[in-house]
Amino acid sequence: MSTTSNILKKLDGMLIINGKLVAAERSDEKIKNPATGELVGMVGVSTAKEVDAAVNAARGAFLKWGKSLPKNRTRYLHRIGELIEEDSESLAEILTMEQGKPLKEAHGEILKLAETFHFYAEEAVRINGETIPNDSLHFDSIVIREPIGVVAAITPWNYPAELVGWKLCAALAAGCTIVVKPAEITPFTALAIGWKCTQAALPPGVVNVVTGSGSEVGQALVENKLIDKIAFTGSSEVGLRIQKSATSIKKMSLELGGNCPLIVTANANIDDAVKGAIRRSFRNCGQICIAINRIYVDHTKYNEFITKLASLTKSLVVANGLNNPEADLGAIASEDSLNKTKKHLEDALIKGARLVAGGSRPVGTELQNGRYFLPTVLVDCNHEMDIMKEETFGPIVGVSKFSELSKALKMANDTPYGLAAYVFSKNIDEIKYLSSNLDYGNVAVNNVDAGIINAPYGGRKQSGIGYEHGREGMLEYTNFKHIRTKFTSLDGG
Ligand code: NAD
């Protein structure tokens, strides 16, 4: 087992290229802990030469990895999962130090990452083909799946372990090799995952990690003709830029932004709905693509719902996630999220919303150097307000009331996004009506955990294309090949 400081020292200023930790030519970017402002470490700004070296290493490794026996890939994936479990506490500390979320959540994320390795280890041996009927008995058509080739994974900072893992594990299971480019502010989690792959003696070049800015390093991967697929998670704006700027034809999966509604009907269990709203609006400071941004409550339950929501929100503990085990919300990872939270708050208040919880920085000298904001609830919101129309990606939620379910549905669908929607109701007909008509890739009913590793997860409209999770998430890394063979009959038929 390795200690956190030993791992960070090992990864400081490093890239992972061709199975080795290599010192970046330039490593003058500081990574700071959002809870304290303290230095976590220095990170490399990959040069064009280093990006090319990583892509070439992945290209070279693909020749063998792409033809390797699935059961061998299974062994490697299980082994990496075990190594991650063994060092899960240190990896969680690194994640919290650079991202700010409470340690228990970071630890949960690392364990889910390990689970992803084990899940795709098992899927690697289940990549089957098909036999297709022909118009003559002398022909056989078989359709097989082959790995796409070299993948570039470009990931955000809100779930720096899982969002790398979903791409990395599925790609490796399918027989692809990969170059990972993590978000600027959370590189150490991705480097630690890459380092675990080298510890598992994965063949050199199968997994590479380059760090640096999106506009240079990310864009260089998008424009690299030796990359066969871009697996991107991030904002819709950057997703669109990536789609427009590719200079050669390549597959893309784009997991983008959300603006997720919750509908609470007259037949909902209000206590459950309030607990669900708290979890999915404020977990990870609301920095979740499937965060509940806006809530529509039946008018007969509105006052009860907002009173309980405000009261439970005020009881949440905002603290340094690394050293306070009671923390419900840690520091906000990104300055942009904090600024957008304040902007959406101000806009809603000017347009007539009422503030019933939060709305400012928490007090306390121990929090003064960190990027903190109290979980915030705005009520009496309407669709003139930005909070009901745009993704905030911060610890704030807007609530509105409705008198007809069809109008709630219309408002819930009134968005260019289509990632996840939530419903609380105990009425089977309401559940059927809403789950059938919500135009979202994921609908969670009477719970707020819209994704599980063995079911496909993806968005519609401006929330993206392609799927992660499940068997479907792995098949996104394969191409079909149709092999049609003519036989000469030996029995004269
Ligand atoms: P972002 O789009 O700013 O950055 C994501 C990644 O793209 C980073 O690694 C960044 O360096 C890179 N990048 C930026 N410009 C690039 C370019 N021109 N070419 C190539 N790469 C480039 O997103 P973020 O702020 O890191 O993350 C927050 C966003 O991610 C939110 O909108 C959130 O909804 C979304 N998200 C979506 C999902 C999902 O599953 N749909 C999951 C998590 C986060």
Image: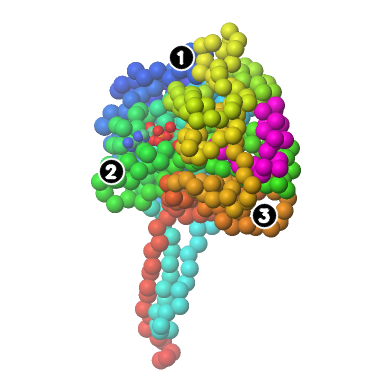
Q: Secondary structure at mark 1?
A: strand
> Residue at label 3?
430
Q: CA distance from mark 1 to mark 3?
A: 51 Å
User: Percent x, y for residue 303?
Assistant: 70, 35
Q: Which residues are magenta?
A: 290-312
Q: Secondary structure at mark 2?
A: helix
Q: State which tag comes first along the sequence, 1 or 3.
A: 1
Instruction: Say which quadrant the C terminus sits in.
Output: bottom left
Pointer 2 residue Cβ closer than 8 Å to ligand 1: yes
> Residue at label 2?
245
- Pick the front one: 373 or 355: 355
Extreme residue in the bottom direction = 492
Q: Which labelled disc corresponds to residue 380?
A: none
Question: Is residue 445 in the magenta section?
Answer: no
What residue is drawn where x is 49% and y is 35%?
A: 385
- Residue 424 is left or right of residue 369, and the answer is right
Quadrant holding ligand 1?
top left
Instruction: Say which quadrant the N terminus sits in.
Output: top right
Q: CA distance from mark 2 to mark 1?
A: 35 Å
Callout 3, which amino acid? Glu
Callout 1, which amino acid? Leu
Q: State which tag comes first along the sequence, 2 or 1.
A: 1
Is residue 385 in sight in this rendering? yes
What residue is drawn where x is 37% and y is 45%?
A: 230
What residue is drawn where x is 32% and y is 28%?
A: 46
Callout 2, which amino acid? Ser
> Residue at label 1?
39
